[in-house]
Amino acid sequence: MAAQFGRRVVKGAATTAVAAVAVAALSASQAPGVTDTAQGRQNTGSQPSSDPDADNSATGNSPYYTDLPPLNSPTPTPTTGTGTPTGTGEAEAGIPATVLDAYKKAETALGESKPGCNLPWQLLAAIGKVESGQARGGRVDANGTTITPILGPVLNGNGFARITDTDGGAYDGDTTHDRAVGPMQFIPSTWEWSGRDGNGDGKKDPNNIYDAALAAGGYLCRFGWDLSDKADLRRAILSYNNSTHYLNTVLSWLEYYREGTHEVPDGTGTLPSGRSDDNNGSSSSPTPTPPGTTPPSSQTPGGGGSTSPSPKPPTTTPPPSTPPTTPAPPTPTDSVDHLEDAGTAKLTATAGDAFAEKIATRTETEAGKAVAKVRVRFTIVGGTDSVFTGGESVATVVTNSSGVATAPALKAGEKTGDFTVRATVVGRAVSGLDYKATVTARQADALARTSDTELTCVAGGEFADQVELKATYKGAAADGVAATATLIKAAGDATANDKGPYFKDADGKTVRTLAGLKTDANGLLKLPKLYADDTAGTYLLRINTTGGATLTVELKVTAAPSSSPSPSAS
């Protein structure tokens, strides 16, 4: 089995010959934004050892597959002497059944929850191809979980970005540094807030293709991005892995899959061969391996799926000594000792409105010196529906030259009360800083009738006109404001009256108090129809709103005409 899924896609001479033409075609007609490359069928390039954007990406800018899609050719051209067609369009267009189902289900879910994002499942397929070769050719069980874990290389700064452990090894098994995990290659710190349960089993597992595909879709749809817009599409892909080569490769596969795909059985998908961390085409594992040993399958990098080469037999000549590894230089994050509030004002907003103030946090050394270029993560916690701009509950911001990170604006939800925003340092175990935010109910400070028509009725009849009001707050229409209407006994007695005009409930019964009323989007409130009993007189209707607005409306009930005949003249 290992041989079946560890094999490489062989590139024939004819494929190499047409590689440049394939890339040019994709760049010119299929994938806007794709740049030409002299590498033929592969985009290559190693990751930097110190990457300030890594811990703010989905993958930590981990290595990825660099193979570009083949030319779409209905009649593959055979290679000389082998009889094997070099056109791999049919095979490369095949996506394992469970993996394909996960992508399509994620598209449907995001189409309902974030319709303005316009996420195509082919984008998830393109990223899945580049990140893990479609979960290593579809090596997943019936529930969509990978047969073996897919892990990227250790992000220790040795040839890759340096991200110290953020999950205690819960996702990647490493308690020192982080590693990208699963078929969509999320680093633990990103999965912690972006993880989703895509298959409804009550768990958020980065090694499950349904969970990972839905999480990837949610990640790409944050910040209000519209993926039908080229600029937003580029921003979203670059946020997943901040590399122009990565962007170009994903765009190429996106356009290729848009041309057409088909389903293949799980475990039979083709595997790419080139990796962004290859050295002159080498596919050896970037994870250091002691001589004479082979790393377990769980250490196979997910961003390439390669296995370590077989150990060489011992020779009589001792191998040259390995020079000592130079430790990675400390990063600004390493010097952070604590977080301090940077002058955040009181955080209060009315339900549905934006908070006027933003949260500002400063990172400092033990001596109190500000630290720039540190990533601070702001997370909304507690039972609230308030969010940051763009609809997200998490935002990561880099500190400026003064060591200050300012969170995006908060938008209050409809749930009133207090909630907390917690600031933490990404990649550094220091105490977080909590900010209390309060959402108050929508309110009005003034009420007025929309008509000055006198409200009159004959005893035993019904009022011709319904009472309509407009609520305002500081001169503007007050929408969604709660109100109560009561037919009161007197101006100085707000007790509900037991006679005179009344409303009817759903069962037609008499009621003289209506609670749970709410103004519409324009601040208008139209009360139900009023009826009169057989008692004539002048009555009062009082309407109160949240925020203290009050209006008392006068209702007049006249006596019914007498049915007795008039006396005749003598």
Image (tube, helix red, strand yellow):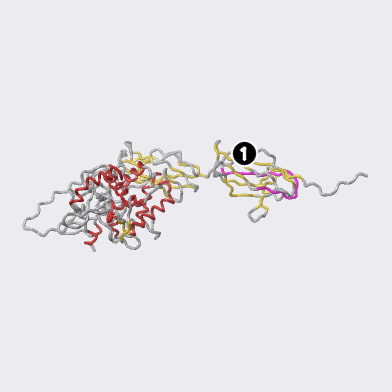
Task: Judge by depth and name the residue closer to the eye, 79 or 549.
Answer: 79
Based on the picture, tell me whether residue 347 belongs to the magenta stretch.
Answer: no
Q: Residue furthest right?
A: 570
**Residue 238: in sight, yes or no?**
yes
What segment carries the magenta color? 529-546
Assign a secondary structure to mark 1: strand
Is residue 335 among what the camera can see?
no
Instruction: Give percent across and percent down for residue 456.
Output: 71, 43
Q: Which residue is mark 1?
A: 448
- Say which quarter of the image contains residue 100: bottom left
Locate residue 534, reporting x and y percent: 75, 50
Figure quadrant of the C terminus: top right
Residue 304, percent across and down?
24, 53
In this orientation, which residue lies closer to the viewer: 491 or 149? Answer: 149
**Figure quadrant of residue 557:** top right
Q: Is residue 443 left or right of residue 71?
A: right
The residue sitting at the left extreme is 316
User: Is the residue 409 above or below the residue 186 in the image?
Assistant: above
What is the three-letter code of the residue carrying label 1? Answer: Ala
Q: Residue at x 27, y 60 (%)?
A: 268
Residue 22 pos. (x, y %):
25, 47
Binning the other alpha carbons within 10 Å of mark 1 as few (below 14), some (14 to 19) or many (20 upward) gives some
Q: Nearer the viewer, residue 200 or 66?
A: 66
